[in-house]
Every structure is written in structure tokens, then in C-alpha cells.
């Protein structure tokens, strides 16, 4: 009698285990079936238009075009707004240049304030959008009136050369850059090399009351080769706003 009751209890326990396993197996099969019929979430489309701000610093050497004529090293700081449509963009903003010496044989330097404007071409971007390669084509322009250019007045020349003076300058750059994006696409760092030319035109007035500036010395008009490196940080404002 005791043995029979034990066998019945054991059989009941096995039946409960079988029912439990059957229920678990049914739940697993049902969940797998639901997952297989669920449509995958559509991928987020890449934004066609992006915009933001950039801060860039460049260390540039300007080569001499002849003996004792020009050649110095400058720092350029750029602060720009940019707008990209797919893989092409434009940018522009303020540029400050430090250590400019007008290609004179002296070490007299000055700080220049100008503007930059240019084009951006994105040639490559990785699938995870973290790595990229871009080319910048841009111009930095300055126009200075009466900078402290070291011109010595002689008995045959006018002293107004030292006072009434104007110079126009254009730094033209080809600038390939490697780009690394982080903070979920909000920030990016770019490192590149830049080569180009500096075109400058120096003029002065013989008469302080005259209306026109005249070329003082043709030697001061030139096209000089220059090259250097740059590092920039950019903030993708459009990405920040789209996450709100």
C-alpha cells in the first residue's frame, strides 16, 4: 500500500514536469515564430544636409622666391560656419594670422585679420560614418591699410611710403584632411596637410591727399609657394538639433 502511494506520487511529479516542459517549449516556439514574422526596423536615412561650426589652426611656411626676399612661418586660426549637402559643402568665416612679416628682410611681424571662404569635397566615408577623407579648396583674404611695413624713406623718395600704404593678400590652399567622428556624430577632428600660394600686392600713395594708390615696387608683387599642416575641431549642430 505504501509502495503504491509512492509510485502514484512519483508519477504525478513526472506528469507535472512533462506539462511544464511542454508549456516552456510551446512558449519558446511561439516567441520564435513572432520574431520571424516581425519586420526589421527600417534604417535611419542619412541626413542630406548638415551644418555646424569649425575651429581650425594651421602652421604654414612661406617659401622665399629669391635671395633675401620673403619667407617666414605663420600661424592661422580659422573660425567658420559650414554647410554640407551630401558630399559637397561650403564654408566661410573669420581668420587671424600671427607672425606675418610682409616678406621683408627684417623680423618685424604683425597680426592680420581677414576672412576665409571655400569648398569641401568628401571623397570617402566609412560605413559606420566614423572615418572619412575630405579635400578643402579655400582662400584666406586680407586687406591691410598702413600696416607697419619697414620702408625707409630716402632723399629721393617720399616719406608718405611709411604712412599711406595698402596691401591685399590672398592665401590659396589645397587641403586634404583625414576626419575622425566621435560623440555619436556630434564632434569630429580633422588632420591635414595644405599647400598653395600667397599672392600679395603692395601699393602706397605719393600724395596723402591723392585718390589712388600707386605700385611702389614691382618686386613686392609676387606669387609665393607655401605649405603646412592643420588641425581642426568641428561641431555638427544639425546632428545635435535632430536628437531633440
Image (cartoon, grey):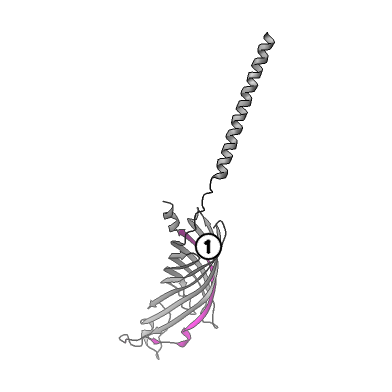
User: Residue visible at 61% across and 33% down?
Assistant: 25
Furthest residue to the left? 209
Residue 192 colored magenta?
no
Residues 49 and 229: in front is: 49
The span shown in magenta is 208-235
Task: Classify 72 as above or below 51.
Answer: below
Task: Identify which residue is drawn at 66% across, 18% down.
Answer: 10
For the residue pair 81 and 146, the one nearer the viewer reads as: 81
Q: Secondary structure at mark 1?
A: strand
Q: Which residue is mark 1?
A: 190
Does 114 sit left or right of 208 as displayed?
right
Residue 87 placement (x, y as % from top left): 50, 65
Vertical comparison of 130 with 77: above or below: above
Judge the density around disc 1: few (<14), some (14-19), many (≥20) Cα neighbours within 10 Å.
many
Could you tell me residue 159's position as x and y percent? 37, 85
Q: Quadrant of residue 79?
A: bottom left
Q: Residue at x 52, y 62 (%)?
A: 190
Left or right: residue 164 versus residue 13 is left
Q: Nearer the viewer, residue 180 or 61?
A: 180
Q: Is residue 89 visible?
A: yes
Horizontal and vertical percent for residue 107? 48, 75
Residue 208 position in % (x across, y down): 32, 85
- Residue 64, located in which quarter of the rendered image? bottom right
Let me know if residue 217 is in the magenta part: yes
> Is residue 112 in view?
no
Amino acid at each position: 500500500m505504501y509502495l503504491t502511494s509512492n509510485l502514484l506520487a512519483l508519477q504525478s511529479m513526472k506528469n507535472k514536469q512533462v506539462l511544464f516542459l511542454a508549456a516552456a517549449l510551446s512558449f519558446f516556439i511561439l516567441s520564435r515564430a513572432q520574431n520571424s514574422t516581425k519586420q526589421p526596423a527600417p534604417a535611419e536615412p542619412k541626413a542630406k544636409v548638415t551644418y555646424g561650426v569649425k575651429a581650425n589652426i594651421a602652421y604654414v611656411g612661406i617659401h622665399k622666391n629669391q635671395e633675401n626676399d620673403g619667407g617666414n612661418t605663420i600661424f592661422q586660426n580659422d573660425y567658420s560656419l559650414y554647410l554640407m549637402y551630401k558630399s559637397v559643402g561650403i564654408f566661410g568665416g573669420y581668420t587671424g594670422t600671427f607672425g606675418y612679416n610682409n616678406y621683408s628682410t627684417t623680423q618685424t611681424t604683425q597680426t592680420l585679420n581677414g576672412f576665409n571662404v571655400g569648398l569641401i569635397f568628401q571623397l570617402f566615408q566609412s560605413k559606420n560614418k566614423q572615418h572619412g577623407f575630405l579635400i578643402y579648396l579655400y582662400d584666406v583674404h586680407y586687406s591691410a591699410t598702413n600696416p607697419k611695413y619697414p620702408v625707409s624713406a630716402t632723399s629721393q623718395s617720399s616719406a608718405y611710403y611709411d604712412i599711406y600704404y595698402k596691401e591685399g593678400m590672398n592665401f590659396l590652399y589645397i587641403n586634404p584632411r583625414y576626419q575622425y567622428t566621435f560623440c555619436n556624430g556630434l564632434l569630429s577632428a580633422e588632420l591635414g596637410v595644405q599647400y598653395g600660394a600667397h599672392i600679395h600686392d603692395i601699393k602706397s600713395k605719393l600724395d596723402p591727399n591723392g585718390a589712388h594708390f600707386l605700385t611702389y615696387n614691382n618686386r613686392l608683387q609676387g606669387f609665393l609657394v607655401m605649405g603646412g599642416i592643420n588641425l581642426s575641431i568641428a561641431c555638427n549642430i544639425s546632428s545635435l538639433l535632430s536628437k531633440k
